[in-house]
Image (cartoon, helix red, strand yellow):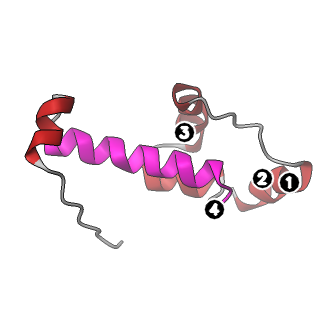
Amino acid sequence: MSTIQLEVPEEVLISLKETPETISQQIQIVAAVKLFELGKLSSGRAAQLAGMSRVQFLNSLGNYQVSPFSLSEQELEQDVQNA
């Protein structure tokens, strides 16, 4: 597994009322959702990046106004094969 470091200004943490640990987890989930939405990751790989099961990931997409069904039929078939 690779580690990526991200610097977040203290003012941002204060504005969000978040700890570095919680904001790190939230950024990881949001990145996974966006990469899935852009078609860069399958739902299974995005779930892996988000640190959750595929079912949890698909259920969480609504929180970000991303449809799990925005894939074409071919993309959906590919996603199922990759799962």
Amino acid found under the numbered disc labelled 1 = Glu
Front residue of 52/4: it is 4
- Give the spatial CA distance, label 4 vs label 1: 15 Å
Q: Are marks 2 and 1 in contact (CB under 8 Å)?
A: yes
Instruction: In the displayed orientation, state which residue is furthest to the right.
Output: 73
- Comes first in the chain, label 4 or label 2: 4
Residue under label 4? 40
Residue 18 visible to the viewer: yes
Kind of element beneath mark 3: helix
Position of the C terminus by quadrant: bottom right
Sequence-earlier tag: 3 or 1: 3
Q: 48 and 18: which one is in front?
A: 18
- Which of the two marks, 4 or 1, is nearer to us in this view? 4
Res 47 visible: no
Number of the label disc, if any, that sits on residue 77:
1
Q: From the image, give the main secondary structure of the stretch colored magenta.
A: helix
Residue ID for mark 2:
80
Tag 3 residue: 57
Q: Is residue 59 magenta?
A: no
Region of the chain picked out in magenta, as a range: 20-40
Query: Disc 3, disc 4: CB below 8 Å?
Result: no
